Image (spheres, helix red, strand yellow):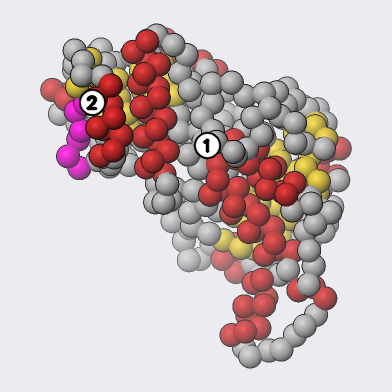
Amino acid sequence: MRRVLVDVAAHAETIARIRAAHPEVALHLIPQPEERARELPVEWLADADALFCTFPPANFEEMKRVRWIQIGSTGYSQLFGLGLAEKGIAASNGRGCFDIPIAEWNMAMMVNLARDLRQLIRNQDAAVWDRGAVFQREIRGLTVGLWGYGGIGRETARLAKALGMRVHVLARTGVQPRLDVYCVEGTGDPHGVLPDRVFRSGEEIEFLGGLDFLVIAMPLTKQSEGLVGERELRALPRSAYVLNPARGPIIEQTALLRALDEGWIAGAALDTHYVYPLPPEHPLWRKPNVILTPHISGSSLSPRYQDRVWDIFARNLDRFLRGEPLLNRLTEAQLAGD
């Protein structure tokens, strides 16, 4: 009997599907799942062969038999320091669950920034009738740069191309087809054919210099933390906007604040931040050229999140039991934070 500990909200349809297909698997559903690390009873952990969660338990070391962890998030920094690769424990993430809502957030922010929706709303509140040209701009024909080309970048590229935008991509080793990665049918760019131009490591300044919008579309790692600093922000045209639905610390905070204050860039849309929750005294709240959202571009409250994350888990459980490659498997380098 294989035992799987589940610390995510139950999805009755998929649970029934798993139990029908795999009567040899025992699912232990934690009664009150939580999206945080906390100690769990040792008797729940000791005999589990697999774990489905967002955050591993604080006493993860008690999981002596676990051979695979499926997490429900795209980000995986919560797995750093667990020594999974050294212990021979496979790990897979929730890539693909949030591609659609985050890509839609990216498109909405580009339109809103281009048309200065924030000022339009201020005008509405103040009963100001202003039909200025600044509110009538369009994004067709503009260039969006995707720094990173995973699922979110690929779905953003698909939507951007549908709206007549040019798509430039900066990816360390270029753009290739994606194998063994979860993707909702009909979305994204699984074959890697949509970008108009592709830049690689060492070509950052050339990439940035030709953009109207820069979208951060990479995970937070040791290498990406602070990757976008003064040099990179100054390389953007002064008319460009920065979107960060990835992780706040990828952009150096001091450099971003200066860029907004001193006009290195035209503005920003930020869904991820440096402190959670962002305190009321933080200067970003008061920037007239910034749209702030509270990390909701993609989250576990998205309407189809549960369907998708349980679909990933069910597909990977099939693969785990058959000894086949997992969808969204994290590499040793990724698990080390490289």
Q: Residues within 10 Å of mark 2 (few under 14, many from 20)?
A: few
Q: Secondary structure at mark 1?
A: loop
Question: What's the magenta region?
Answer: 27-32
Which residue carries the number 1 mark? 184
Residue under numbered circle 2: 19
Crowding around mark 1 (Cα neighbors within 10 Å: few <14, some 14 to 19, many 20+) is some
Where 205 falls versus 129 (above or below)? Answer: above
Residue at x 67% of width, y 77% of height: 120
Q: Nearer the viewer, residue 148 or 177?
A: 177
Q: Position of residue 249 (x, y in %)?
A: 58, 43
User: Where does the image place residue 73, in percent across and percent down from the top left?
Assistant: 44, 37
Image quadrant where one finds the C terminus:
top right
- The disc placed on residue 162 is none
The picture places residue 283, in percent across and down from the top left corner, at 58, 63
Foreground pick, 300 / 125: 300
Which residue shows up at 37% across the image and 28% down it? 313
**Along the horizontal axis of the image, is 121 left or right of 2?**
right
User: In terms of secondary structure, where does tag 2 sit?
Assistant: helix
Q: Answer with left or right where residue 200 lies relative to residue 277.
A: right
Instruction: Answer with mark 1 or mark 2, whichever residue precedes in sequence.
Output: 2
Estimate the x, y position of residue 291 in percent, counting from the top left. Answer: 61, 63
Q: Where 22 sits versus 205, above or below?
A: above
